Amino acid sequence: MTNASVKTRDGRRVMLYRSFTSGALSSTLYSEPTKFVFGLTNTTGLISSTDLDNPVPVSNGTVCDNGSVNLTGSLGGDNSTSNTTTYKEGAGAVDATAQNLIANSSDVTKQWTNAATAAAIVATSRLGLWIYIKDATTLAKFLTSGTALTVRVGTDASNYYSLTRTAAQLSTGWNFLTTNKSAINTLSVVGTPGTMNRLDIIITTNNATDTFVAGDVVYDLLRTWVEADTYVSYDATFPTIDYNNLEVTRQVTLSSAQLNGFNVAAIGTKNTDTAPLLTDIDTITPFSKDSIDQYTVVLVDRIL
Amino acid sequence: MANPSLQKTVIDGVDVSSYVINWTADETLEKTIRTLSVNVKTSISTVYSYEADSLIGKTIEVYRGVNSPSEQIIFRGYIRKTEELRGVLNLACEDKLSLAKYVIVNTSFLSNNGVENGRVSEIFKTLVNSYTSLIADNTSVQSSGTSAVEILKIYRLRQRNLLDGLQELATAIDWQFYYDPVYDRVFFEPKGYRISDIVLSTQTNIPQIPKWDFKSDQLFNQLTVVGSAQTLLKQEGPIKLDGSTANWNTTSVKLAFKPDTVKVLCDNTTTPTTEKKGGIPGMDTGYAYVVDKTTGVISWNTSVFAPASTYYATVQYTYKSPIIITRSDVASIAQYTGGVPKAITQVREDLQTIEDVANWAKYQLSIYAKPFVMIENCPVINESALRIGYMHKVDDPITGYTYNLMIKSLTMRYPYKPDSVTLTDQDYRVVAWGIDRAQRLRRIEEGNTSDTSVINTYADFVHSFKVGRRYIKITKRDLTGANVITGTNYTLGTNFVLGTALFQTGFTGPLTTEYLFPGDNYYQELAYDTQFYDAGSSTGVTWDTSAKTIAITGQLVSKPICIGPTVTACTVVLSSDNPGLSMSVSADDGASWTPITSQGVRTVINTPGTTFKYKIVNTISGFPTPWGTWGGSSTVTLSNAYKDDGTLDISIINILLETV
């Protein structure tokens, strides 16, 4: 990814429409951009970009499981233990606790379950949770080829949606497993999930004797959100326009409660069209947002 | 005189002579625009920065001389095309007359309205001076005449290319036009008008016997000219219809010529006075005769009128008789065609008098009764002022030929080789004389007069402007030192806005700029604000945001213009070249500096880093000295450069960053 600031083709269309259309302007077509979006790692912004690759929720959304509840182990998995040192902030969760996924040597398949999440997991929402892998040695225990990690959300053991990852799709440190821009109900499904309050995390190792101790693999913060949760409006009084120097400034302030836990590598602006258009995209050197800081993003554009 | 082997080439005001590998300048009478092909080394970029097609449209001047490279200018024009291959940059150039190629004209000239008064030479001058930056004045344009046959009553250019219009005027009166770089003027004159005092001779400046070409393929020495047909009146009769006169009888009458109009008198008297009515079968009734104009036979319609053999008839009629004149050039017949005339016929129905026809034949023979002379690609040495369209005496004592010939094409080269000229007498001998020229002008008038259509003119203007990101900046303020109460129920402390997670205005926890990046990796400083001006670190600087100028007596240091990405290289351009300033850049927030030695040239940062800034030092003033004291106080003021229409051309400081 290269650092870049691009006004997208849709952004240029908005400028043309709003500069040269006579009569009343539509409020749902080529409307002016009024909100920011933020994302994780992103390909270099292009004029043809229509969305961020990995937009993340700015608002809390719904915390289905804040990671403070011990998970029940089965097969090669033992009951999880709480970890108050390595945990993830975000979504307004203040428990400051995650779960160590402890694995024994009885089976290559290690499973942990929360059968009663604090909030229902809504199938039409987007989904995300965090998995921490301590180091390369730990990652090497994950099945080398094929599905190494499965996350199931559902009604019970026979009715669920599942999200899978191979070892190659994981890295040491925190991994954000997400449906990204899709809803949960677009995942592969078994049975007919109804109201969903069950979470299963299944790790397949190369050998049954590949075990995890506290701190090796950590789970935290199962959350859901909708598209609107990925938007944050410009700060009040913005944009400001300098008609003398032909400059416009747009700004958003991310409070200490917003966007926490994410390594932000892409910033975009969107409008309020029926299908919101991405009008700007900036791919940046990543910054990490947490609850002790407040970030202000300023975009200054000008006409020369 | 020696060969003009020295040369000087200037591009956009910059002397690039030492980078020129070779050039070739070509011009011909037919092409009108002189062309120049120059090969230069790509290392020209050390004195003249260029990218891709940025040279197109730039001016170029070429000089050559014997003792000094700038004795004689031989080319003044524009670069039209560039091509770069293996360290060589080829420039394809056209002289200043090429400006006329890119102008579309929509105008009219009426002989009774305007200063031109229909005079072709004046129309030419007005077109050149009004629609281009070229000059055509009384020193470069001859008068084409003001008589009725020499003027254009109406001349229109309807959305036409200017060069086409100029060529049309030149063709109409068989004149030539070209751009002369010495006088920086457009010349318009009869072919062969200019006579050079340079004699081209095999004894002096023609190093080898030229190939004399005598072209007789168009030669003729007997000419019959058929002029316009005249209408004549004739009467035949009275003649008795008894057949005593051949073809005059009671059936029909045959005339001596083919008639146009006919009047027939016929009755039983020796001097008939009774006019008879003619008619056309199938269309008329009661007619006494029918006329066959192709055979000249009048046939009696005997069902209506059957004259007896005692009747007399008188026919009065008109008929067409063309002017036909034949002239011969006896000397040419004897010398060139072995005593047998080489004859042709020309039809000139526009010539309406015997005198006109006779003169035309005479003048045509004066042109075509002798062969045309041509010398192609003749090398000429020791001359630097040859120009096409000029007449020279060409003297070849070796072959015994001496002719006055006009340079029709000219090629000059560097490194020096003999100039190559093609000389001929055909182009100025074959000049339309007054009558033909007048006819051409009349034809132009007819075309313009009949053209009364309304032209819908679209004026297309392209407004292009750049909308871009000036910069993106991300700042972070953290809670260190904030008044916060935390616990199971998270309660915001006094440093937060009640009911929100936002810090209160005025909270002075540490504020850092986490990320700052100029749009498109391109920093442009226009000085209308002080966003990136570090006043605290600068000395002897006046940053005027109203005038948008930066006056430097001492040292200007910027705030960081890029934070976050690792900068590894940059390219710097200032709005003007200022030898009194030195510039350096830093990517580690000023811990180390890399000097910028040349504008427009990529500079690798000695120590790549994530906080990039620049500084500019006035070296005239002598600041800084090792002792921190100043030298002189000469101030260098930097300002934006604007185009004629007021839009920005180059901002004060331009830095293109390379990041990883």
Image (cartoon, coloured by chain):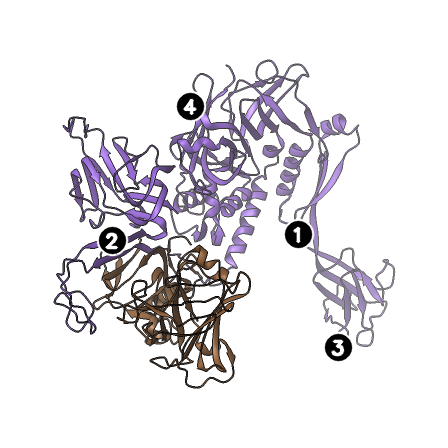
Chain colours: A brown, B purple
Label 4 residue SS: loop
- Residue nearest the viewer, comparing B156 with A202: A202
Q: Amino acid at mark 4?
A: Ser
User: In the image, is residue B217 above or below residue B260?
Assistant: above
Nearest to N terminus: mark 2 or mark 3: 3
In the rendered image, residues at marks 4 and 3 fall on the same chain:
yes
Label 3 residue SS: loop
Rounded to the nearest whole Å, what is the CA distance between mark 4 and mark 3?
93 Å
Q: Amino acid at mark 2?
A: Thr
User: In the image, is residue A160 above or below residue B109?
Assistant: below
The residue wearing badge 1 is B230
The residue wearing badge 3 is B286
Contact, mark 2 vs mark 4 (Cβ under 8 Å): no
**Residue drawn where x is 52% and y is 52% of the image:** B445
Question: In the rendered structure, the residue with mark 3 lies on which chain?
Answer: B
Rounded to the nearest whole Å, what is the CA distance between mark 2 and mark 3?
115 Å
Question: In the rendered structure, the residue with mark 2 lies on which chain?
Answer: B
Q: Nearer the viewer, mark 2 or mark 3?
A: 2
Q: Nearer the viewer, mark 4 or mark 3?
A: 4
Nearest to N terminus: mark 1 or mark 3: 1
| Rendering quarter of residue B126 | top left
Residue A206: % across, % down: 53, 62
